[in-house]
Image (tube, rainbow, N blue to C red):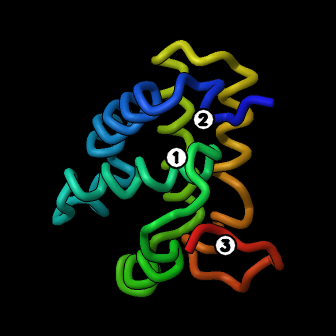
Amino acid sequence: MSTLYEKLGGEKTVKLVVAKFYERVVNDDRIKHFFDEVDMFKQKLHQLDFLTYAFEGSERYRGPTMREVHKKLVQERGLSDEHFNAFVEDLVETLKELEISPALIEEAVAVAGSVEHRHEVLNRKPSGKSSPK
């Protein structure tokens, strides 16, 4: 059976998704301020690594935990559900722009926008399932 990573088109497509996604994110008034002082080259590499892992294109995630990366943003800059939702909406719009099928978009959002990832990003109590470390 194919992984979501393979169904999306593999490395080439996921790299394009990440590039287009961050073009959208840095222009989204709801969340762009979180990226003002971020090295976007490194950010895109981290996101590529995360999505590759999350979409089962790799067996391991090499980056820091979601909780660790976002802790300061939650505590000091008010990262919230509203921002997480905007991030997921931007992913959906990016996938639509790239003409990814609705079924694959739904599958991608079920992974990247999962409750477990939301809890990790927003530094909430774990729901019992693990997310990338």
Q: Nearer the viewer, residue 101 or 33?
A: 101
- CA–CA distance in space, label 1 to label 3: 20 Å
> Of marks 2 and 3, which one's residue comes earlier in the chain?
2
Quarter of the image with the C terminus is: bottom right
Q: Which residue is mark 1?
A: 52
Q: Nearer the viewer, residue 103 or 73?
A: 103
Tag 2: residue type?
Tyr
Q: Which residue is mark 2?
A: 5
Disc number placed over residue 90 in the picture, else none:
none
Q: Where residue 73 appears, x then y in whole percent?
A: 39, 77
Instruction: Answer whether labels 1 and 2 touch (C-beta < 8 Å).
Output: yes
Q: Where residue 89 appears, x then y in whole percent?
A: 55, 39
- CA–CA distance in space, label 2 to label 3: 23 Å
Q: Which residue is mark 3?
A: 119
Q: Nearer the viewer, residue 29 or 48?
A: 48
Q: Nearer the viewer, residue 81 or 126?
A: 126
Q: Element type at marker 3?
A: helix
Image height check: is 85 above or below 24? Answer: below
> Of marks 1 and 2, which one's residue comes earlier in the chain?
2
Instruction: Answer whether labels 1 and 3 touch (C-beta < 8 Å).
Output: no
Tag 1: residue type?
Thr
Image height check: is 24 above or below 113? Answer: above
Tag 3: residue type?
His
Image height check: is 69 above or below 118? Answer: below
Q: How many marks?
A: 3
Hey, which quadrant is residue 77 in on the image? bottom left
Q: Residues within 10 Å of mark 1 (few under 14, many from 20)?
A: many
Image side of residue 128 versus residue 98, left or right = right
Residue at 53% over, 79% down: 67
